[in-house]
Amino acid sequence: MTHNRSTVRFLLDGKVVEIQQWMPTTMLLPVLREQLGRTGCKEGCAEGDCGACTVLVGREHHGQVRYQSVNACIRPLALVDGCEVVTVESLAPAGMPLHPVQQALIQHHASQCGFCTPGIAMSLAGRYLEAGRPDRPQVLSCLSGNLCRCTGYRPIVDAALAMDDYPPTSHWNKLSGCEPSKLAAIRALDDGTTLVQESAGHIFVAPRTQAELSGWLANHPDATLVGGATDIGVAINKAFFAPRILIALLRVQGLGEISTDAETINIGASVSVADAFTELTTHYPELAELGDRFASPPIRHAGTLAGNLANGSPVGDALPVLLALDAELSLVSVQGVRRIALHGFYTGYRQNLLRAGEYLSAIHIPCPRPGQRIAAYKLARRYDQDISAVSIAFSASVQDGCLSQVRLAFGGMAACAKRVSELEVALEGASLERVCAAGIDTWLGQALSPQSDHRASADYRMAAASGLLRRALQEWQGNDAGRIHHLEATS
Amino acid sequence: MNAPLSRTNTCVGQAIQHESAHLHVTGHAHYTADVPLPAGALHAAIAYSPHAHARFSTIDCTDMLAAPEVVGVLTARDIPGQNNYGGIRPDDPLLAETLVEYAGQPVCLVVADSHLAARRAARKLSANWQPLAAILDIDSALAADSFLLPTETLVRGDADAALAIAPRHFSGQFEMGGQEHFYLEGQVAVAIPDDDKGVCIRSSTQHPSEIQHIVAHALCLSASQVTVQCRRMGGAFGGKESQAALVATLAALAARHFGRTVSLRLDRDDDMLITGKRHDFRVRYQAGTDAAGHLLALDIELASRCGYSADLSGPVNDRAMLHIDNAYWLPAVRVTSHRLKTHTVSNTAFRGFGGPQGMLAIEAVLDDIARQLGIDPWTVRRRNLYQPHQHTPYGMSVEGAPLARLVDTLAEDGRYADKRRAIDAFNAASPYVKRGLALTPVKFGISFTATHYNQAGALLHIYTDGSVLIHHGGTEMGQGLFTKIAQIVAEELGIHIDRVRVSATDTAKVPNTSATAASSGSDLNGQAAAAAAKCLRSRLEAFAATRFGVSTDDIRFANDDVFAGAHVLSFEELVKAAYFARIQLFATGYYATPDLAYEKGSFQGRPFYYFACGAALAEVAVDTLTGEMRTLSLDVLHDAGHSLNPALDIGQIEGGLMQGLGWLTMEQLVWKNDGTLATHAPSTYKIPSARDWPEASRIRLLQHAPNQADTIHRSKAIGEPPFMLGMAVFFAVRDAVAACASEHCSVSLNAPATEEAILVAVQKARTPQ
């Protein structure tokens, strides 16, 4: 039996910050700005899209401290309990030289109005703390969650490419994560207690064990589960969503594991999208682009793959690809564990088979089989940090130009992400060349019923879905359809 | 005294860093919401209309008042004076009285102990709404004769007669969308009650003086009782020219009512729903050319959606008309401009101020002509480019605009012809991906068309330690105005720039200021600051001449030292000596732009002091399977005259271009059928991100190009003109789409060129007509 406490404790610049007065919906950003004077963290959108509030959160990872960027605006205060928080003010304490990231930004004229700059500095600082110097694609990926409206980003990218040329400072260098004192300080925050807060009829709890979690869920089957809060945080800020009981998975032992054996990749419920995709792309390199375009680094660091699935948005980026890969889910309750296929999990718009009192504990993805090919494309207004209008995942074994074990799934084309079984059957055994000539559009038209919204019309979604499938078929035939994102300018 | 055409400066013209760069990167730069509030400060939130058009007679405040932490709710009845924040026409109520005319229109102000509590309570607005029929778009407004302002025309020659005899005829329609400013810092103001009923407002605003007057009128105060201050904005782009007054005045109203400091900061969604945006336009035209594509006649109609109130729509549409020529000779032209009233948010100033819409219109016309004639669009553009002796349709000479030099240098350096050949070859061999190329010029008139705005003041203090404080009427929104002002002052006084501090803009220091807008910030305030510095330098020269017995001609200020004949002393020593000799060490400076001759609405004369010009060459790629596009390269040559600060000017060019690229490719405002805005946050309204800037970019300033007009150090304004460089990207997309066509025909692609619009255009291009 663990003991409870209600004080949130985190490290800030080497000192323990204790927050006693807080609500389950209190976000980190207003605490930093209004209680701790860290006004360098800006609110630009309060939904994790602009990055002006970016801070680093340090947590223990493989015996070191790993610092990752997150959006403070949608980070519930309670989710930094037991962590270290690094703000832009931390980078160069009074009397210390400017951090290389800061020097590079100044030298490259990378700020104009300056409002986005602290967030950009923190995204870059997160990258700077990692080993090695980033190349241009890595810099672009790193900055994909930061909007700037004044510059054309060119000087910011130049600064990022040059930041490793500046002399490192004693504060926040590439060895910071290895400093034993930092790890010790973070470990010292954890007295093994469970964080529980009750405020005006609302409860927050961060269970430490799966038994504890199941117990809470059994007593409160209507509870809202939260992973990284990248979706719930938006609902809290924008719609004043106030769940009666909010249960955080982040600190539950055993849910943060990734284990892979010969057949299966197993991803625990609190594994971040970033870590999940790192593992997935080890086995399926074709998923690298999708992983890079999945929201932004701060969102990927906070959000979980399980959250993306359980949330079940019809445009969730992981859904089509995990459907096409025949992923399975472990669902746990006090009654025990059941393992079900993701295909069939969704029963309607944001509806699924999870029962009251049950939680998704792990995702199981088969390892690739010989001859298997996959294509996963996302179509959105903007390449980076945008919600898909349409996405497709296509998996099949290709032998002698013929398809077998076909899986074809779409997002954004129906009330939930779904496989197009009719077309899968039609494609089974077909030759790639013959498929190209076949009436793809007719099959898709029969199976899919997209809606029109502010992102795209139904007509466009149908046309684009067809285009994406044809792109995959072209590429599998070895005819590089020519991706615009791989093109060089005419010299 | 005319500034020299050759450069001899030491501080001006240097690529000096933004004066606040070190504060930006450390998080220590204070924006309006960052200054700690005094104890007992209150927070306000706007409760707004859910209806596009509705009447109401009573507001039920019960639920709002019952919400936690709420201390009060203010309605129109609580405004002691004028219920208006319209700067030109008094048709913008601060709080609606009985009628709402857009979804998002402020109805009451909820005041609470915290920001969150005020926002939460504001959602509980209840009123006896009687919804009315709403006019939401340009077509329905035209059909209903819903004109907000009288239709205007600009005429040169006889367009009808010229059309009748032109060998080739063209006609078409073109639409362009609006644009959200998306300044990263939302609208915000903090109002602090002063004694004797006065109020001091810290506002994120481009136009402190206008706020001062609106607050005074709303609260029945004199202007002298209202102080408005702004140290810096987190971006503005025109969106804080008139719109900031709403937020500042409501904060002041609450501060007055409750006698406490009140902060009003708009959440992003509220900001996007409540405040105005760029005007969307519909263009219809008839054009006549010869066989080579020379324009002989143009009859063009512009129709813009102004929203529910006048705001700045009159001058915005005037500027669209005055820029219908962009860089081209239009021998016979008639421009008709409809300013339409709709039940949508009142559209407002946005970088370019109507100029981009006018310029995009003529570029679309030329693109259509070129495509139908089967001539490369760049050839047609070049053939129609102004020659130096020609005049604009409103009769102003274009002599000082180095257009031919700019475009020919860019075409040469950017290797337009080589790229054209390579791209044609690529497209012929590529079934799915098509490349496109376009080169477009920019000519933009510099000055407020409201001539009286073309004035500025400054107040310069030299303290006895030799430090210098400059106050001026301009505001800092990231464009680097304060840096340029500091450079100008340092240059005049021969001192290091570190000695010069630029004060927050403050209506108590420099009165009757113009908006920092129309790209005029450094032109106007730079001259005023220079005048103040010259005045003080003269005084110090006279004093030194007497003290050291030399002629004033023998006195030189340089490198923080003063050379008086054989005597050398530090600037600080001279200043201290002057103080003890009782020499006045502060002075004002004033500037009014000369040579303007323009009456509003006449569309004839010299509305502009000069033209700022540029040209961009863009290459894009389009995926014809999906309609996705990507910018592959950008080559720019831009005319900043003798740049005051090349680093800042390059920053303006890149940022402006990127914003123009966003307007024309990805930024799409979508309204639902009930008139509510569907895209009111960055999750749904996408502005460009880092990857949208191509690695292959070459952005250069035109060298050895002093402004022919006698501007501050012969520089040229840089704020708005680069925005229109983004047009090259749009027409490069059209070029790529045209590569799908098998015959010579126009590309049916409106702006923004979203992936959906592009795919539809590709499908049309592939369908024989």
Image (cartoon, coloured by chain):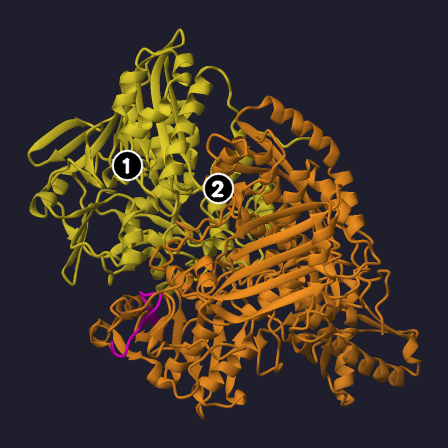
Identified by mark 1, the residue type is Ala
Measured as percent of width and height from the top left, residue B752 is found at 51, 47
Q: Nearer the viewer, residue A407 or A332?
A: A407
Label placed on residue B659: none
Q: Nearer the viewer, residue A425 or B694?
A: A425
Q: Is residue A467 magenta?
A: no
Identified by mark 2, the residue type is Ala
**Chain B rendering hue:** orange
Label placed on residue A414: 1
Q: Establish if B1 lies above or below A340.
A: below
Chain appearing in yellow on the rendered image: A
Measured as percent of width and height from the top left, residue B29 is found at 52, 63
Question: What residue is shown at x 47% (from left), y 48% (from top)?
Answer: A146
Q: Quadrant of the C terminus of chain A?
A: top right
User: What span is in magenta?
Assistant: B45-59
**Quarter residue B238 falls in:** bottom right
Residue sitting farthest toward the bottom: B196
Q: Does the magenta stretch include residue B47?
A: yes
The disc numbered 2 marks a residue on which chain? Answer: B
| For residue B522, side relative to residue B704 (left or right) | left
Q: Name the residue under label 2.
A: B757
